[in-house]
Image (cartoon, rainbow, N blue to C red):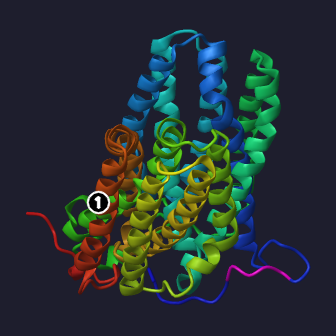
Amino acid sequence: MTSSPRTGARPRASGRRLLPADPLLRRLVLMGLVNSVGDGLFVTVNVLFFTRSIGLTPTSVALGLTVAGVCGVFAGVPMGRLADRVGSKRLLLVVGPLEAAAVLGYAFVHSFAAFVVLACAATALSRGATAVRSALIARALPAEGQVRSRALLRSVMNAGLVVGSGGAALALQADSYTGYVTMMVLDAVSFLGVTVLLAGLPVSATAAGATGASGAGGATGAAADPSGPRTALRDRRYLLVTTLHAVLELQHAVLTVGLPLWIVLGTGAPAAMVAAVNVVNCLLVVVFQVRASRGVTDVPSAARACARGALLLAGGCLVYAAAQYGPAWAAAGALLVGALVHTLGELLTSAGGWTLSLDLADPRAHGEYQGVFMSGQAAAHVIGPLVVTLTAVDRGAVGWVVLAAVFALAGPALTAAVRGAAPGAAPGAAVRLG
């Protein structure tokens, strides 16, 4: 994939334990699990904390989180570039405690302005850290098994979110300031725990991400090439692929925003179907993400996976549209089938996206390239709720058909965009702006 094959980790479990046998991958899995449990605790209670304990209105919270989301979109590239310069591991050792401090800071917020400032800082750190972690994984894990390893990490992280969300139910039941703050303290502890695990991660300075800056891990292959690494923001093909995959990433808003509103406002299904659909999605990701990554080994196979996934996402939208017709039991059945088809599409587009983001990147600038790709995903998460609301929620079946068409067209467009692309290790393969 992103480099010549190396011996080492494969995402297989030891015969006597569920964790992978390879120490590096095992440490990454533990880091992902701890981080996602903390995320589950925080995400489950944060909106209620902001409204019931701080006293902000729902509109203020939504506005503040939208502004913070925009800040997150622009955090990936500078953080990625910094990781390329000083090393991903070294940067994350600083960012982790800062994320913990940002989460704890919410307990001391008493105004909308302070909330917006802190939310922007926390979101920028979170989005930036995601790009830096992706660059770290790109350099540290064996090339031939990296997509499968990332699939394992995603499965574990979804399991952690479920555990964290379940634990946060206690705070929701108590509905008290103390209970909500306790969840935030635990989330902060999770960031510190990840930092401790990261400190012992067995990777070299070069693998951790320094690319030739003095004192930052030594020179790499980039130093030997007078032209230097490519610039992601001038790599036309990479920008196009990032944009098209971001379109597919709108499926996240379909699941988290459009579908809950559609179930309550547009179908006769019981409101409990919102939770049922989420459970189906989480369980399928935990169980089948690794399996869905099989066969995704290079750019062409990744593009095919994204194209198939796009068609499944489109099919899921059409099934959701059909849920408005018939009695409650029929609507509930259609929603579950739609969630199944949707999640299968999500599994394939995720696996394909990882490969494309890595194989089309210049391995000497993984931080910047992963920052660009993650910023595309972040942008989709920011505008997704508006897009899905204006189509599926406001227009009903017609809106769902429009969304289905968007997904169905994005898949073939992505396949066309990568046709003839060489791996990122060949600097001349990029099409540059200017």
Taken as a whole, is the magenta stretch helix, strand or loop?
loop
> Residue 127's spot in the image, x, y percent?
48, 46
Q: Residue at x 16, y 69 (%)?
A: 432
Name the quadrant of the C terminus.
bottom left
> Residue 367's spot in the image, x, y percent?
42, 60
Observer-nearest of 397 and 86: 397
Q: Residues in magenta?
A: 10-14
Outermost right residue: 16
User: Is residue 273 rendered magenta in the image?
Assistant: no
Q: Residue at x 81, y 26 (%)?
A: 173
Q: Secondary structure at mark 1?
A: helix
Q: Can the viewer see residue 211 in this picture?
A: no
Instruction: Look at label 1 and name its amino acid.
Output: Val
Q: Which residue matches tag 1?
A: 406
Q: Is residue 394 above or below residue 206?
A: above
Q: Is residue 259 above or below residue 107?
A: below
Q: Can the viewer see residue 378 in this picture?
A: yes
Q: Quadrant of residue 260?
A: top right
Observer-nearest of 422 and 247: 247
Q: Residue at x 24, y 58 (%)?
A: 233
> Residue 166's spot in the image, x, y percent?
78, 43
Q: Is residue 216 above or below residue 44?
A: below
